[in-house]
Image (cartoon, rainbow, N blue to C red):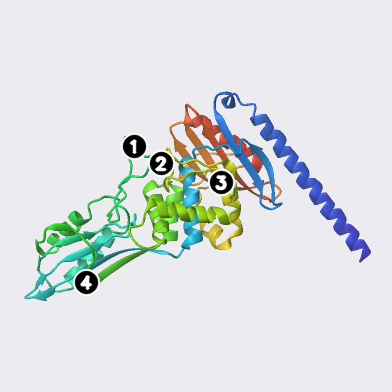
Amino acid sequence: IQKRNILSLIFVGCSFIGLQAQTDSIKVRLDSLMQDPLLERTQLGLMVYDLTADSAIYAYGAKQTLRPASTMKLLTAVTALDQLGGDYQYRTSLHYTGEVKDSVLLGDIYCVGGMDPMFDDDDMNSFVRSICALGIDSIHGRLVSVTSFKEENLLGEGWCWDDDNPQLTPLLVSRKNEFLDCLSEKLRRSGIALDAPYATGSLPKNALNLSTRFRPLKEILVPMMKESDNLYAESMFFQIAAKMGPRPAKAAHARQLIKTTLGKAGVENIPYKIADGSGLSLYNYVTPELMVKLLIYAYRKSDIIYHLYSALPIASEDGTLKKRMLKSPASGRVRAKTGTLTGISSLAGYCPTSEGHMLAFCIINQGVMKNAEGREFQDRVCKVLCE
């Protein structure tokens, strides 16, 4: 027994020495990267945290307030998983009022939007089939869009007017704000004549449900993170907002719940500003320290990290990291969210060390004239972490 205890102490001591040596090596190599001429004319915020050892191992400008660009989607994703869960369902529903007489619907069709960004042609065909199942050949009434799910603004706060921005409407089909046009065209093709002008209104209590299309949050999370889809992120932002209660859901509601999740992550006395859910806004500000605290919280919550980790882009393999860190120690190992705006390049996520420790990191390069410069710097950091 005494021999085993001594051997155990030796093993623990060697492990600690090995860990310290690895940490020191990372620090030395990261220090050398801080001599990059890029940092003489730009801002850098960097933080690295060893999740296995539960300790911060490197920080450079980690308390600076910087624009996150699309790494903002991490705040949206983690909050959604924290507040709603991966099985939360987006829903778009179809209802009608009135009665059917002699194959004619004498009443209105109501399309109730839930801001499902993946609602597509197949979903619309399902809606059309449900109307045809009424046994009608014409509609004498209205096609009514119910868009009370969210506030009326179609653009996010602080979005540049000349960007190719998604329209933030609760009723979308194939990413376009053409829901009623699409529905009416498909109805006509199905042999249903329409005497049905468009209208906007609310759903009457006596309306009968024809069909509801559901979409789980976890299904939307993957393309949102892998491809950095802004529309998907904003739709998730307003699902978070909708949890606050009475409609319409407002951006202010989502910000309040993101603040709640950040509080659970231990974010106190750290300045930040949240404007939108995608990172398109120029009004978003975070610190690398805040982002790392969020990543730590997510990693320690099994129901969050289960969905988040698999949704993050993988270096050299898929998503927005598919062409980065090729043939390097970081290839296939780094899982992180990218961010790009004019003058901003960012990267935040997870990577394992060669010793099997898991790291959380955040890198924000601000003021870069060429975003490629920021990406190249971040890739070098990740190679150091994984070597």
Tell me the mark number nearer the camera, choosing from 1 and 4.
4
Read off the residue under disc 3.
Answer: 291
Q: Residues within 10 Å of mark 4 (few under 14, many from 20)?
A: some
Residue type, label 1? Asp
Q: Residue at x 69, y 34 (%)?
A: 29
Q: Is residue 316 left or right of residue 159?
A: right
Q: Quadrant of the N terminus?
A: bottom right
Residue 84 location (% of width, % of height): 46, 62
Toward the viewer: 178 or 29? 178
Q: Are marks 2 and 1 in contact (CB under 8 Å)?
A: yes
Q: Which mark is residue 280?
A: 2
**Can you tell which mark lies on residue 163?**
1
Which residue is pictured at 47% across the width and 28% down the height?
A: 370
What kind of element bears circle 1?
Answer: loop
Few, some or many C-alpha atoms within 10 Å of disc 3 (few <14, some 14-19, many ≥20)? many
Q: Amino acid at mark 2?
A: Leu
Q: Nearest the camera: 151 or 133?
A: 151
Q: Earlier in the sequence, mark 1 or mark 4?
A: 1
